[in-house]
Image (spheres, rainbow, N blue to C red):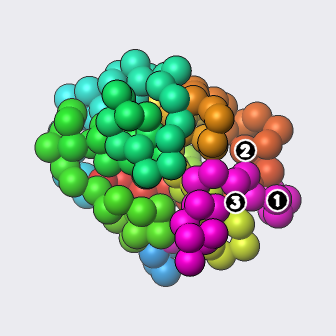
Amino acid sequence: MLALLLAGCASPPTAQRGWQAYPASGGAAAPAADIPSRLTPEQAGDVTLYAVGLVGTPYRYGGNTPESGFDCSGLISHVYRSRAGVVPPRTVAKLQFWGAPVAGEAIRSGDVVLFAQRDTVTHAGIYVGEGRFVHAPSTGGEVRLESLASRYWASQRVAFRRP
């Protein structure tokens, strides 16, 4: 069990699946205008700016504050709680069912990015616009801003959720 939890954010997936959405909720993603959100546009902007401001914070398994460091779900939890007053699930496994599914062409800043190996969600981040996301990648690393189009991330299965 501990090994599975550690793999949730610490280990990069090895399967090369290509850029495709996976069924994070069992349903199809709705068009952007039809997707409900708990966040106002201002809150989504605050989430985005704050997440980018945390770049460089050390990774720590189980971490959920800037002082202690972050794992991927801890980063998401901290950012949404502190900037939008919204409490997301604390695990990557539960984040895949949080909010509403969003098609790749409809994503916007403040949406959650989920990566999967086969059909298991293994990592998550916060979309910040222009094809980039903020995440806490792995042990020994730090919170980073990366492109979804980079070689590694573009080879992963990905889905998006709107809180």
Tell me the CA gap for discs 2 and 3.
Answer: 8 Å
According to the picture, the residue beneath numbered tag 1 turns out to be: 14
| Magenta residues, start to end | 1-24
140 or 126, which is in the foreground? 140
- Horizontal and vertical percent for residue 7? 64, 62
Whether residue 8 is in magenta: the answer is yes
- Location of residue 68 by image quarter: top left
Q: Residue at x 70, y 54 (%)?
A: 11
Q: Which residue is mark 3?
A: 157
Question: Alpha-carbon neighbours of circle 1 within 10 Å: few (<14), some, or many (≥20)?
Answer: few
Residue named by callout 2: 153
Q: Compared to 102, does 76 lie above or below?
A: above
Residue found 73% across the figure and 36% down from its top: 149
Quadrant placement of the C terminus: bottom left
- Percent of width and height locating residue 144: 57, 28
Q: Residues within 10 Å of mark 2 (few under 14, many from 20)?
A: some
